[in-house]
């Protein structure tokens, strides 16, 4: 399963390299077991990255000797968004009212909104860490190429007139795939799955779903900022 995921990511990355190759970067979400499967991830990636963290929830690869001290600016590429196809199929099969089914238009709107929110939250957090967010390349620019894949929402709120209230324990889950690049050299790769830990029987709406997604994105962004600060020898607040 892990090899299938890597094949898909490599294909996606190559397809999107084009003019962005100078900045190169990449990807969120079923359960961690579904992503990682039973096959052990390689200790060394095809690019020469070494496996540093291997849990049911997270994989972290790092280039030996990678030095993050020279970077004062960050180029954050648009976040690729992909919803779980099995989740979409199962959800649409579970509702009888055609107006309550999730359409391609609904998905496109959700992808645009989530990608924009990702960029806003990560830009805000990295700016707090002293980085200037830029769309230019350079020797002091660390390029981030993110994606959120296999996204599943427990109770999507399409705000359909007359739609009944939906209650669920969690808003859903998603997986972050993120690569850090220096020009044409990949420095690190992170794959991490997170779910929303909500209150059992809580009503789920578009507002609560967005709030749950924001909490996960903020936690990822804050952790990235702290890791970069530690790599540069800075102390970080708890």
Image (cartoon, rainbow, N blue to C red):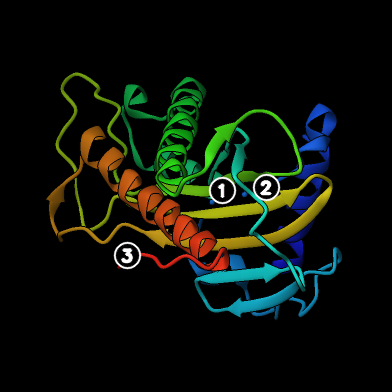
Tag 1 and tag 2, C-beta contact below 8 Å: no
Counting from the top left corner in percent of width and height, residue 72 is at 60, 45
Q: Quadrant of residue 124?
A: top left
Q: Quadrant of residue 173?
A: bottom left
Q: Residue at x 47, y 46 (%)?
A: 130
Task: Say which residue label 2 marks.
Answer: 26
In the image, 44: left or right of 141?
A: right
Q: Which mark is residue 237?
A: 3
Q: Tell me which label, 3 or 1, sits earlier in the chain.
A: 1
Counting from the top left corner in percent of width and height, residue 204 is at 20, 43
Instruction: Please tell me which residue lies in front, 21 or 88.
Output: 21
| 110, above or below 94, in the image | above
In the image, 119: left or right of 13?
A: left
**Could you tell me how far apart the alpha carbons at marks 3 and 1 are, in whole angstroms?**
30 Å
Task: Say which residue label 1 marks.
Answer: 149
**Could you tell me how far apart the alpha carbons at marks 1 and 2 are, in whole angstroms?**
11 Å
Q: Residue at x 80, y 44 (%)?
A: 183
**Could you tell me how far apart the alpha carbons at marks 2 and 3 are, in whole angstroms?**
28 Å
| 182, above or below 113, in the image | below
Q: Residue at x 84, y 69 (%)?
A: 48
In the image, 89: left or right of 54?
A: left
- Per the image, label 2 sits on a secondary structure element best described as loop
- Per the image, label 3 sits on a secondary structure element best described as loop
């Amino acid at each position: 399963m892990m090899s299938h995921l890597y094949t898909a990511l490599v294909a996606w990355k190559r397809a999107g390299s084009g003019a962005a190759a100078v900045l190169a970067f990449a990807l969120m979400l079923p359960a961690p077991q579904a992503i990682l499967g039973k096959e052990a991830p390689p200790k060394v990636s095809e690019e020469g990255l070494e496996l540093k963290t291997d849990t049911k929830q997270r994989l972290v690869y790092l280039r030996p000797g990678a030095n993050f001290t020279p970077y004062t600016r960050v180029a954050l590429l648009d976040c690729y968004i992909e919803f779980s196809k099995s989740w979409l199929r199962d959800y649409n099969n579970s509702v009888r009212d055609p107006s309550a089914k999730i359409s391609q238009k609904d998905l496109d709107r959700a992808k645009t909104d989530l990608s924009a929110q990702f960029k806003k939250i990560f830009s805000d957090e990295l700016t707090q860490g002293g980085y200037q967010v830029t769309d230019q390349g350079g020797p002091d620019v660390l390029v981030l190429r993110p994606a959120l894949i296999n996204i599943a929402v427990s109770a999507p709120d399409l705000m359909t007139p007359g739609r009944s209230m939906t209650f669920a324990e969690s808003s859903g889950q998603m997986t972050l795939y993120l690569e850090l690049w220096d020009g044409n050299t990949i420095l690190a790769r992170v794959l991490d799955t997170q779910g929303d830990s909500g209150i059992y029987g809580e009503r789920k709406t578009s507002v609560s779903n967005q709030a749950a997604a924001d909490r996960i994105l903020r936690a990822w962004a804050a952790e990235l900022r702290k890791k970069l600060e530690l790599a540069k020898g800075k102390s970080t607040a708890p």
